Image (cartoon, grey):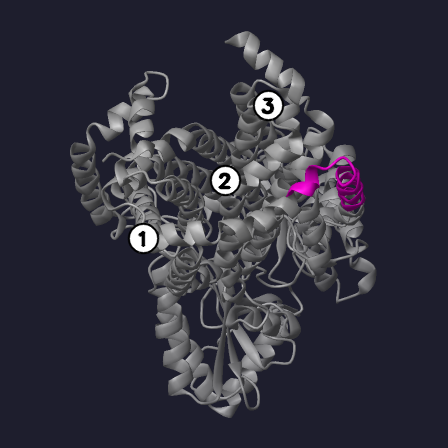
Amino acid sequence: MSNPKHDKGEHYLTTPKAEPFLERLIFNNRAAILLAFLVLTLFLGYNAIKIQPDASFERMIPLEHPYIVNMLDHRDDLENLGNFVRIAVEAKDGDIFNKEYMETLKQITDEVFFLNGVDRAGLKSLWTANVRWVEVTEQGFQGGSVIPDGYDGSPASLESLRQNILRSNEVGRLVSDNFGSTVVYAPLYEKNPETGEPLDYAQFSRQLEAQIRAKYEAQNANVEIHIVGFAKKVGDLIEGIGSIAWFAGITIILTTLLLFGYSRCISGTLVPVFASIVAVFWQLGALRLLGYGLDPYSVLVPFLVFAIGISHGVQVVNAMALEAAKGFDPITAARLAFRALYIPGMLALISDAFGFLTLLFIQIDVIKDLAVAAGLGVAIVIVTNLVLHPLIMSYIGITKGGIRHVQNHGEKQDRKWRVMSYFSHPSVAPISLLIAVLGLGLGVYYKQGLKVGDLDQGAPELRADSVYNQDNAYLINNYSTSADVLVVMVKTPAEQCTQYNVLRALDGLQWELQNTPGVQSSVSLADVSKIVTKALNEGNWKWYEISRNQTIINASIREAPAGLINTNCSLTPVLVFLEDHKAETLQTAVDVVEAYAAKANNEEHTFLLAAGNAGVEAATNEVISKAKDMMLVFVYGVVSLLCLLTFRSIRAVLCIVVPLGLTSILCEAIMAVSGIGIKVATLPVIALGVGIGVDYGIYIYTKLEKFLLEGKTLQEAYYETLRSTGKAVVFTGVTLGLGVVTWIFSPIKFQADMGFLLFFMFLWNMVGAIWLLPALARFLLRPERMLAKAQQSK
């Protein structure tokens, strides 16, 4: 005897209106589509396991910013462009003036010289010929290499070395203030000049660790190595990526256990996890085929793709379990679940994808790469979770245990949903809105303290107690010249960079900067001219000035270091040493330079910003500051437009988008209170949180509208909404939150920050959809008008 429910379902499935074209296309060709999935998964999976970590100095900076354009236009004329490493060799007992230490330093210098990627012409160490001393004697200028001729390590040679260092002006730069260490300074090529291959930061960092730190600390117990610089920081970040495999495993196991607790169904647990893992492999394989690698920032995107896949997979499992509990067979339950979810699912995922793609407007390549990776991943989830997942479930179905779980817990859950439906009650909704307004006020108040850029010394992407940041702290504490260098370029006509008016302008800028908070010191051609002029006049300080006599100026800069003048004397830099690279320090220094340039620039000389690692940071901060609000406008604009096109109601859009907006403001407030600045690593979180958070609102509103159009009251419609999809939304929010909260324990600080922020946004977006959306609906929606309009359109 046939089951009446099956009969009803079969009859329903045969009506053209109930059986969309996509449903017929997919479920009438199940075997062929699954075979195609298998082939694609093997192909893309093979490519996925071959994807490589990727990092590039130029891809992590805003190449179109005027500062960076100026820097790259004059890269051949400048040192201190920002991509270098400083290797401090510390004498743990005593000072550097002993034979064994100097021999170790010589070996390290030679070792660094032959590392791939090092600009050997720019390498500096006490043992390199470009580090010299100069003095004025009765016979005129005398000088030579800091390492004395005939050096043999004897006490006399070491004393001669000490005198040469004191005369070299390198104390505080290459030599520590207490003579306890010296620096090997190694500028780097972004690309190998012979092969054109980009610098492999991971390999370079490993070479520094193995061939420099480990090797020489083992050889000489009195030596300790400290290494800082962009390349080492990126290398450490890539090294930290290895730990992400552990977090991936933890996330998968935790998600699997939670899914089983939710569904009590083996197939309802393993299939969505499998489909989400397939989506990750497809994404990684496609990225490799498109020529992308995984940089330290986009490496987290596969986590998000997995999370989004689980988010939508739970909806499929929930819908199938409800249909199976009614008595439908697996194929019918799968088709009904697909029919109910494909429109809201596609809308939510398309909103996610377009939300992520708005990051393409930010002119920093690593953020663009992240946008492409996230957008591509979401596009793949549309296929794996709305096609692969239902097709597999159509063969396997919900287990008897899963069906019993739905049937046995229905009454208990009904009581819970009945209580939660009061969020839409006329007496409760105003209280919810009042709480939301208070939260909005607090968020707006605290977010005023949100800063753009780094808020701490060292590398904020790494933990404060990381080896890199400990090394950085050592250099800050023992050297008077900071590693944070802002380079101001002064451009003149050819052969005019040493003119009196140019040097006076340099000197004027330096005076302004030396009276600026956060600036340690500065160096320019004007300093060289003043020092040598004084030396030529018996060291009398009255002569410590720029001479108006051009002949004297020409004589004074004859021995100027190569880094302070280019070959045709058309460019000379001002090196500004900053206390740190915090956002406020950078902005203060940049504002001073820009104000001075505005009044000093003329036909004879033009002040251009900016090179040096601090110049790069300043440009990056400016781009992010301008892009933040624009990105939010685009994200919310795209999400609102897609919701408007789908629901054809501005009121519906407000119900879905307003809770997201509250979450964004509260997230920025939490960032301000927690001391997390907006930078390359954290800016995408805002877009990602909005993109994923909109899913909750779309699923809730889709069901709510359906029940309202059936003639139910708002509270009754919301009760039915919670019964049908509320559990899945709550579970998804909790699961996604717990999945990313494990990142807080990552050795990579920015990954921990992203985990913390995403944890908040996932949970709070879920709360907003469950709690605030029905309260807004109470004041915005007009169920009777919606019903009348729907009846008129029929």
Whole-Å distance between the Cαs marked 3 and 1? 34 Å
Describe the element under mark 1 as helix, strand or loop.
helix
Q: Report the residue marked by disc 2.
A: 724
Mark 3, secondary structure of its residue? loop
The local crowd at label 3, few if under 14, some if 14 to 19, many if 20 or more residues have their Cα within 10 Å, is some
On screen, residue 202 above or below 26? below
Q: Camera-side residue: 211 or 286?
A: 286
- Lateral position of residue 595 relative to residue 657, left or right: right
- Residue 443, numbered label: none
Instruction: Find out whether the residues at labels 2 and 1 contact each other: C-beta distance under 8 Å.
Output: no
The magenta segment:
421-440
- As for residue 309 lying within the magenta part, the answer is no
What residue is at 63 percent from the left and 47 percent from the top? 767
* Residue under numbered circle 3: 711
Query: Which SS type dominates the magenta stretch?
Result: helix
For the N terminus, the quadrant is: top left
313 displayed left or right of 709: left
Question: Does residue 578 lie above or below 444 as drawn?
Answer: below
319 or 608: nearer the eye? Answer: 319
Dot 1: within a 10 Å radius of its alpha carbon, few (fewer than 14), some, or many (20 or more) residues? some
Name which of mark 2 and mark 3 comes first in the sequence: 3
User: What is the three-letter code of the residue carrying label 2?
Assistant: Ser
State the residue at coordinates (42%, 46%): 314
The residue where tag 1 is placed is 400
At numbered mark 2, what does the secondary structure look like: helix, strand or loop?
A: helix
- The location of residue 294, given as percent across then percent down, is 38, 50
Q: Quadrant of residue 750?
A: bottom right
